Amino acid sequence: MSKTKKYNKLFGGLLIHSLILSFSPLLFRAWTDDLNIVLTLATVAAFVPIFLSMGKQEFFKQLTEKREKVNPIMLILLLLAPMGTNIIGAMLGIGMNKLLALAGLSITQTGAEMAKEVAESPGFFLALYTCLIAPVFEEFAFRNNLLRGMEKPRPWLAVILSGVMFALMHGNLEQSVSLIATAIFFSYLAKRYSMWVPIVAHIANNTIFYIFSAFKPAAGSLLDTVNNIITFGGIIAFIVVLISAIRYIIKDIRGAKIADPNSAQESEQISIDTQKKPAYVKNIFFILYFVYWLAMIVLNDFVL
């Protein structure tokens, strides 16, 4: 398959995914008024073009691919580390809001609104969507599909871009900015480990958010103490994981530039690949993806 056809399928499927995710709720709302059921149906329906563009064989091949093994202790650290990336995201969100305020602009505090919605109406379908459906299908679409499809020839550029594209998909400025650090972290996990590591980490991150938003622990309560322990442990875990990630990235980049002593031809090819500009940056569907979601952010935050 030519690169043009490959990227047309990859980004074309992702663009159709975006359109279904944006507009299918209008159809499902005619069937049920439960927004959580609507979002669940929209998320599953939006994955269909992704699955079709990948094909069953490729989907399961990527999903079951084995990369670096992760021991139980490191897995616990990886599950807690998003607490640190969430703090970074929150700081970025605060900075963005201050800049907007200086310009006389304001946007809906989407994160606070989501937490309020969970607190006011916790239930089965909200928990199902937040803790399972959304994280699983988002990882299928943006790591198992998008990241894997972009990894060559610049894997670390793919990690960053797939994270940014995932953040933009949320369709509002506050959430997109605050999720960038966590999204890139999930892409790093998919790059280094099997796909199940970012899936489980994403589920854990959303579940922690749901639990502490739904129950809103009072200060000094047992649940509040648990929340503080998890937050503090998450910060420590993030620092440990960050150090490990930096070491891994340096080793990985160096490894891509070192010749295999048994293959000069492979060495030359690696050198070429690591310097090549990815062909997908000129793909029309890749460009349209950014145009579409940036337009949606403007409409959602500053027009509607």
Image (cartoon, rainbow, N blue to C red):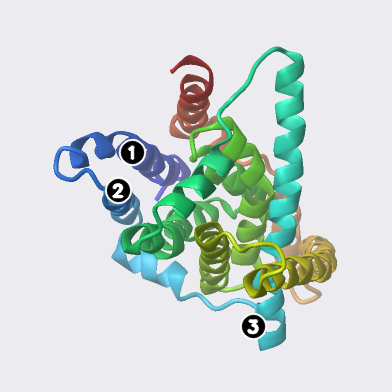
The residue at the point 52 percent across, 23 percent down is 301
Q: Are marks 1 and 2 in contact (CB under 8 Å)?
A: yes
Name the one closer to the observer, 280 or 221.
Answer: 221
Up the image or down, 15 lies above or below 152; here it is above
Instruction: Compute the Cα span from label 3 to label 1.
Output: 34 Å
Label 3 – label 2 distance at C-alpha: 31 Å
Q: Quadrant of residue 253?
A: bottom right
Residue at image point 59% right, 64% down? 190
Q: Which residue is mark 3?
A: 69
Q: 274 and 159: which one is in front?
A: 159
- Left or right: where does residue 213 sit relative to residue 72? left
Left or right: 230 as drawn, with respect to 302: right
Give whichever of 69, 117 is nearer the camera: 117
List the residue tagged with mark 2.
49
Label 1, on which residue?
Answer: 16
Residue type, mark 3 in image: Lys
